[in-house]
Image (cartoon, rainbow, N blue to C red):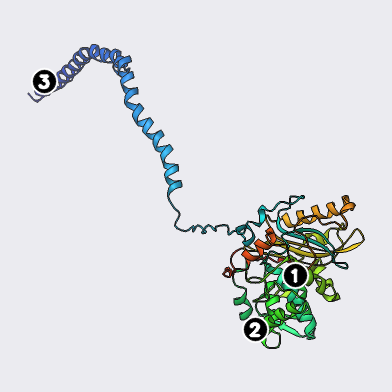
Amino acid sequence: MRRIFGQVGGFDGRLRRGVNAAAAALSLSALLPALLTVLLLLPLATTPSPAQAAGKGEARAPSSAKAASRSRVQPSARKAAPRRSAKRAPMRRAVPSVGRLAGLHATDDELDLKSAVAFVVDSETDEVLFSKNPDAVLPIASITKLMTALVVVESGVSMDEPLTVTAEDLRATAGARTRRNLAPGTTLPRGEMLRLALMASENRAAHVLGRSHPGGVRAFVAAMNAKARLLDMLDTRYVEPTGLSSDNRSSAHDLARLVRAASEHEIIREYSTDSDAVVASGRRQMQFRNTNGLVHNSAWDIAVQKTGYIAAAGRCVVMQVEMAGRQLIMVLLDSAGRYSRIGDAERLRRWLFDRPEKAGAVASPAAAPLRAAAPAGTAGQAAASLLDLPVTTLPAALAIEAPSAVPQVR
């Protein structure tokens, strides 16, 4: 019996496996056509129609245009956004000079000079060779230092006495736009301070010279004005020894007298025409250069010179030069442009050499002997009377004379 049931059970197992296999075969055969149909239709279903492709392209176009627009907008937006760390320097307005405000630049001359005032006179005979607005009283900037030097030299003080730059000198010259200044605590002999004041127009050196005078700056300025009166410089006044104040004023006639008096001292002739000097300022060596480029020009034989610049005065220069066998004094005031005073000096030099028949002849109707007043009603006299009005002292920060100094490479 067990054998029979066992055989039946084995047959039943084989039967079930056979039935399952047959069912699997039947289901596979039934599904195979469906699978084939799906595989054939799948590429057609995934490939978009032309209309669908166009629709999708149009749908994506706004997004691409938006991205392009964003790429164009973002840089300008970033550029417009202010930087918190960067601070813009305030813009400085150009301050017209006193001569320009008075209309002196409108005065015509045959050389078309850029200077409002031009004056050339023979130092030995007082013969005027060229004259343009010679009686106009204008700020003279650092030409002041020529009188500073004259008072120091004639006072008899020792040129070897050591002088030190102090906080008072810094305050008095605060705002002067210079590339280099003598550092506080710098100690130099009085003679070296004088050299830097004349050659490189060093403002602190000039103030040290005035402060160290017996009686201080006030007594020194009084001595400057007293010397001006002795020289018959009746249009001249000084209020401080550096030239930073626009209240330091003079005329071309008066400055010619000052140049002549200064040229009598060898130390002033030497120091004003030195090309450069190296001094120890603090912990470094500094090289100062002459502010007058003509000193380096072999075509010019300069005995005495001084340059000057503040906004109210424009570019100025005074010189005593040997030219055509004569000792001539040249004064140029309120020149427009950084190099225009040098250009005007060159024009005058060429004019004197190229036109010898002009020697002894006045080049302008406004010319006159050194002390003679201009005829009534002339432009020079009108300008002088106009410019006699007081002018408020300008801040030292307005375009102050810059000593030409660079660090010395060790």
Comparing 135 with 204, the one in front is 135
Q: Which of 188 and 219 is in front in this view?
A: 219
Kind of residue sitting beneath label 1: Asp
Residue 410 visible here? no
Write down the residue under mark 3: 8
- Between the residue at mark 2 and the residue at mark 1, the CA separation in whole angstroms equals 22 Å
Q: Where is residue 183 in the image (x, y as percent from the top left)?
A: 66, 75
Q: Quadrant of the C terminus?
A: bottom right
Image point 44% across, 52% down: which residue?
82
Mark 1 crowdedness (10 Å alpha carbons): few <14, some 14-19, many ≥20: many
- Disc 2 element: helix
Percent of width and height locating residue 156? 80, 86
Which residue occupies 35% across, 31% down? 63
- Measure the C-alpha gap from mark 2 to mark 3: 143 Å
Proximity of marks 2 and 3: CB atoms separated by less than 8 Å: no
Locate residue 7, reporting x and y percent. 13, 21
Q: Residue 362 carries which label?
A: none
Which quarter of the picture shows residue 70? top left
> In terms of sequence position, does the residue under pointer 2 or pointer 3 come before the other?
3
